[in-house]
Image (cartoon, rainbow, N blue to C red):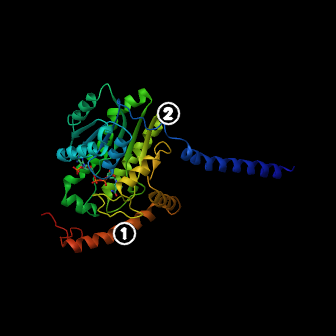
Amino acid sequence: MSPIEIFGFISFWFILIRLTIWAFIPLWRHLRPINSIWRPSANNWAIVTGGTDGIGLAYCQHLASIGYPLLIISRNYDKLVTVKDQLKQQFGIKCPPIRILAFDFSINDIDGSHYRTIEDEIQQLRPGRVDVLINNVGVSFANADYFTVIAHRSPDLMSKMINVNVVSALMMTRMVWNEMLEQNRGIILNIGSQSALNPIPLLALYSATKAFVDYFTHTLVIESRDHSGVIVQSVLPGFVATKMSHLRPSFNVPTADVFVRSAMSRVGRSNRTFGYWWHTIIGIVYEFFNHTLGSDFNSRLAFNILHSYRVKYYRYKKIRDLYNDPIIDQ
Ligand SMILES: NC(=O)c1ccc[n+]([C@@H]2O[C@H](COP(=O)([O-])OP(=O)(O)OC[C@H]3O[C@@H](n4cnc5c(N)ncnc54)[C@H](OP(=O)(O)O)[C@@H]3O)[C@@H](O)[C@H]2O)c1
């Protein structure tokens, strides 16, 4: 064999083995049995933030259906009571214990005193422990708009959005993380959004908060690499038919129930999921453009789409457009 033939032979086998590993690892992750992932028991609790509506409510229903005792944390006490009653009615005698806690995640918690309410509630679960944490609570804007308009029209919305979308995930994770690592057991799902994939102008703050949560999740995945029983996953949905999106269900906009059933089946298979088959296709296309054409391409595309929605919104609402007709402070 000539040196060139030897080089060709080694390269051929090297590339073949790399391709086989590349193709089989995701396939194996997808096909391996996941019965051991969800472990509901009287002492293994699940916490869902923002669990009275939309995606959070669907998580509560699915977790209760497999027997997880639930602690549901959301803003409105009456709605929490209604959800608890509904679950009890839905599952009858098979309904696991359900606790509710009214808590407003938008409040600034400078000294951590506000979150102590949740810490106390978690202590009440003893001798049980938190086995599952779904950091779902989130808020978005009523309409896409320029940052300058948001900053002028609703300055408090900025801190509220950071508190609800970012601080909640940090604080909730902080409360359960050490015990999960010590016991080498636990599941944390951080509900982000596809708007974390690249910067979305006119949804600047929302996409930035979701990117934060996605990055945070990745760091936890790496930091907990030696704890094989701890699962941390970033869930990045596209549009889901909920109050937040104001969209009706269709093949590309699943109901919260369909989305959650699909997303739960992906837990333990990857550290990051789009959750639903259509969102996965769109996510892969986004990522492909990000890597080939640069993230500016996707951002500009998003800008053009959202800008056209913005124009329609202003025409429909007949309100003053602070971007094109700004109020200059004297
Ligand atoms: N829907 C989508 O198309 C979509 C797409 C991508 C990502 N996501 C993400 O998925 C998550 C859930 O969204 P969703 O569409 O299900 O939203 P949703 O239908 O508006 O439900 C939000 C839930 O959070 C609660 N909540 C809101 N603000 C709160 C606060 N300050 N304190 C405590 N609880 C509060 C709400 O309680 P109340 O009932 O009292 O308001 C409700 O239970 C969010 O993180 C969102 O960013 C949604």
Identity of the residue drawn at 19% across and 57% down: 154
Left-right relation of 179 to 114: right
Q: Secondary structure at mark 1?
A: helix
Identity of the residue drawn at 64% across and 46% down: 21
Query: Outermost residue, top direction?
Result: 127
Estimate the x, y position of residue 61 in percent, counting from the top left.
33, 46
Residue occupying the far front of the picture: 93
**Amino acid type for the residue under numbered disc 1:** Ile
Report the residue marked by disc 1: 305
Q: Amino acid at mark 2?
A: Ser
Query: Residue 74 appears in which quarter of the rendering?
Result: top left
Q: Quadrant of the C terminus?
A: bottom left
Q: Nearer the viewer, residue 239 or 109?
A: 239
In the image, 122 versus 84, the foreground residue is 84
Q: As displayed, is residue 301 above or below residue 11?
A: below
Is residue 130 in sight in this rendering?
yes
Depth check: 216 or 322 in front? 216
Per the rendering, the mark at residue 228 is: 2
When asked about the image quadrant of residue 115, the answer is: top left
Q: Is residue 287 above or below residue 42?
A: below
From the top left corner, tell me how far across and down residue 301 is, in percent.
41, 67
Crowdedness near tag 1: few (<14), some (14–19) or many (≥20) residues, C-alpha within 10 Å: few
Q: Tell me which numbered mark, 1 or 2, is placed earlier along the sequence.
A: 2
Label 2, residues with CA under 10 Å away: few <14, some 14-19, many ≥20: few
Alpha carbons under labels 1 and 2: distance apart? 42 Å
Query: Mark 1, mark 2: which one is toward the viewer?
Result: 2
Are discs 1 and 2 less than 8 Å apart at CB?
Answer: no
Is label 2 in a helix, a strand or a loop?
A: loop
Give the quadrant of residue 125: top left
Disc 1 Cβ-to-ligand 1 distance below 8 Å: no
Query: Position of 101 compared to 278: left or right?
Result: left
- In this view, which residue lies farthest toward the left? 330
